[in-house]
Amino acid sequence: MKVLDIKLRRDLLHMKGQVLAIGLVIACGVATLVMSLGVLTSLQTTLYDHYDRYRFADVFARLKRAPNSLSAHIADIPGVAHVQTRVVTDVTLDVPGLPEPAVGRLISLPPTGAPALNDLYLRSGRRPEPGRTGEVLANEAFAEAHNLRPGDSVSAIINGRFQRLTVVGVALSPEYVFQIREGDFVPDHRRFGVFWLDHDELAAAYNMEGAFNSVALKLSPGASEPDVLARLDRLIAPYGGLGSYGREDHLSHRFLSDELKQLRAIGLISPLIFYSVAAFLLNVVLSRLISTQREQIATLKAYGYTPAEIGGHYVKMVIVVVLLGVAIGCVAGVGLGRDLTGTYARFYRFPSTEFHLPPWAVAVAFLASAAAAVGGVLGAVRRATAMAPAEAMRPEAPATYRPLLAERLGLTRLWSASARMVLRHLERRPLRAALSVLGIALATSILVVSSFNKDSLDYLIEFQFFGAQREDLTVAFAEPASARTVHELENLPGVIRVEPFRSVPVRVRHGHRSRRIAVQGMPPRPQRQLARLIDVRGRETDVPPDGLLISGKLAEVLAVRPGDTVTAEVLEGERPVYDLRVVAVIDDVSGLNGYTTLRAANHIMREGDVISGAALSADRAEVGALHARLKQMPRVASVAVTAASMRSFEQTIAENIRKMRLFNLVFAAVIAFGVVYNTARISLSERSRELASLRVLGFTRREISSILLSELAALTLLAIPVGLAAGWGFSALICLMLDTETYRFPLVITPATYGYAAVVTVVAALASGLVVRRRLDRLDLVAVLKSRD
């Protein structure tokens, strides 16, 4: 074994506590990176394999009713490879054990063979057989939520008539990997299900023989999607076309894409923070080690070792620490990745979802860790190799002490002798003190980041379900209904208040940018108390009498500001086109939304007093009777129960956030202890000679401990406010990177979170201080006081 390798082993053993602490910090970053890259790769691979194997379409469109002969004209559009027409409709379900009505989406299957596009994976049972009335395939999420198995049944109102649907199988579809209904804030598997049944049976029930109302297209390689969409819109417009859209705007795919985007953000931000802390620690520790090994470096140079060999020796030390961190981090990352993949598998439905860690992810983790660590110690290594042997043989010049500013002002009585020692030591090395403060501050900031998600989630629940949606339930009709329907709703059991709305599907354009949205027509504020328009700061906004109020995210996507004009292409009815002025922008938390008055929405549609549904408040004592009546109303297409939506939200997003919070809390606590412990150990190494001198002069162990620990306390107290501010900044960055078209997380950090971060940092400082105090008690006075001159 080479001499430098023997020295390396001895140095690592001597610094084993510090090496382990730094290795754990690196392991936190590696675990985050491995988990994120592994889950991201696993989801992407599974997703696109599922899309490819079951032929997920590229273009989708809904319409009122078109003859089957139109499919031939659609197939003639340049770039179209396959066309799949079908019948799709939403119905009200009566599910055993569910008091409120559920919504079922019925999708027709071809009489023979598998669908050309959007094929099904059969999880259990069999496919419906032609001629056997009422046989359906149920999607897996809904079946699991109600424990439905082949042979079970549910009741549905199909075109005004009750019909029993018998489940003969459970299936998965690439269209509903993430099963959420248009307009819903969160998925609700108990109250929204997808069913597939024989085409002839569904077509006959809705007088759609020889016709279709939904079409999906597969495009040829190199086809122009915008050109296909424009041509398809022109073809289906005479048949009540509701506008075509590509895969990127498909609801399930958009949620998945946004989730993958958020995973990428987590995989970028968290490791960056952890690696920054590790680089800082390595720099401080190695700089101190080099300063204590000046004579050894000089001796090595005198014996002929080159600067490159000496520098390589210290780089090797860094690489060993990195390897330790990567090994621990990979094991932890794989475990966390498997757990997170299992969580995703409950919300994103694939035939199989397994965690796979690609080898390149381990390589990326190692290279990123090595780059951060080596980058953090290059300055210290350069100084070590630049010292001349004669200079290195001399001990460092003693520090210059001078009176503190307070002492020069005659305020020495304010502090004891021990306190003045602490303040003088910090003042004579301000850069080192600042770096120690920065390290502890970074640990504190991670504690803030680890908890702000919960604060945002709690605020989001309060905002959405107690501030914006104060109704008990929302009723949507299968077809727009007369405003007189409001009186029918008011006469239902337990109904206290009814607020109607009109939902208008439009495509809004500004320049080359466009999005498909639903413009919500609502009563003005005096008549509207349930569905409120409030921004993330809780300020209520009224709907403009003309023009549009749009969400901040839509304004960002379209690049518009208040006062600008957008083109609104209505996608149903007479399909009029209007130029509408953007009156105001509201910062909401989900979706791309537009709002106007109910009267203006009716004017846009060129219709009389028509509504799409209504928000209802109800007497809780009679809510059971109300749900029973709603199940029997054929014109009711869906009923959204606010309390159920809140529970679903908490069970989906909240579960993920709680897991990530626990994961971040553990890592943050490790980092906090690692930073504070290393700071304390370095301070002990630097001051061991003077502390031993004080012991010889008669100071007790308690007195010299108070000097060292007071310095640590001063650094911690200085670092906490800096860390809290940095935590706010990191949290703002995460909110920015998690900002998607589907969800926006508001930046909310409560005083409790700041208090928690401060308390954990203080506890880490106390624990580190106790460990260092034990070493101080065992200080060898003779060895420390030996002269090095």
Image (cartoon, rainbow, N blue to C red):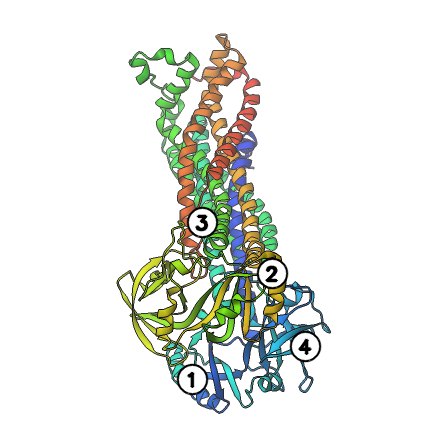
Mark 2: amino acid: Val
Q: Find numbered disc 4 in the image and state the secondary structure of the residue it sits on.
A: strand
Query: Can the viewer see residue 283 in this picture?
Result: no
Residue where numbered disc 3 is placed: 269
CA gap, disc 4 and disc 2: 25 Å
Residue 473 location in percent, x, y? 54, 62
Residue where numbered disc 4 is placed: 164
Residue where numbered disc 1 is placed: 236
Q: Tell us which disc is closer to us: 3 or 1.
A: 1
Q: Is residue 695 positioned above or below 26 on the image?
A: above
In primary-sequence order, the first of circles 3 and 2 is: 3
At 41% from the left edge and 52% from the top edge, which residue is drawn?
536
Does residue 510 appear left or right of residue 775 in this picture?
left
Which corner quadrant of the image does residue 577 belong to?
Answer: bottom left
Contact check, label 4 and label 2, Cβ < 8 Å: no
Residue 474 location in percent, x, y? 52, 64
Residue 201 location in percent, x, y? 62, 85
Q: Find numbered disc 2 in the image and state the secondary structure of the residue it sits on.
A: helix
CA gap, disc 1 and disc 2: 42 Å
Mark 3: amino acid: Ile
* Residue nearest the viewer, comparing 527 with 463: 527
CA gap, disc 3 and disc 1: 46 Å
Mark 1: amino acid: Ile
Q: Tell us which disc is closer to us: 4 or 2.
A: 2
Residue where numbered disc 2 is placed: 623
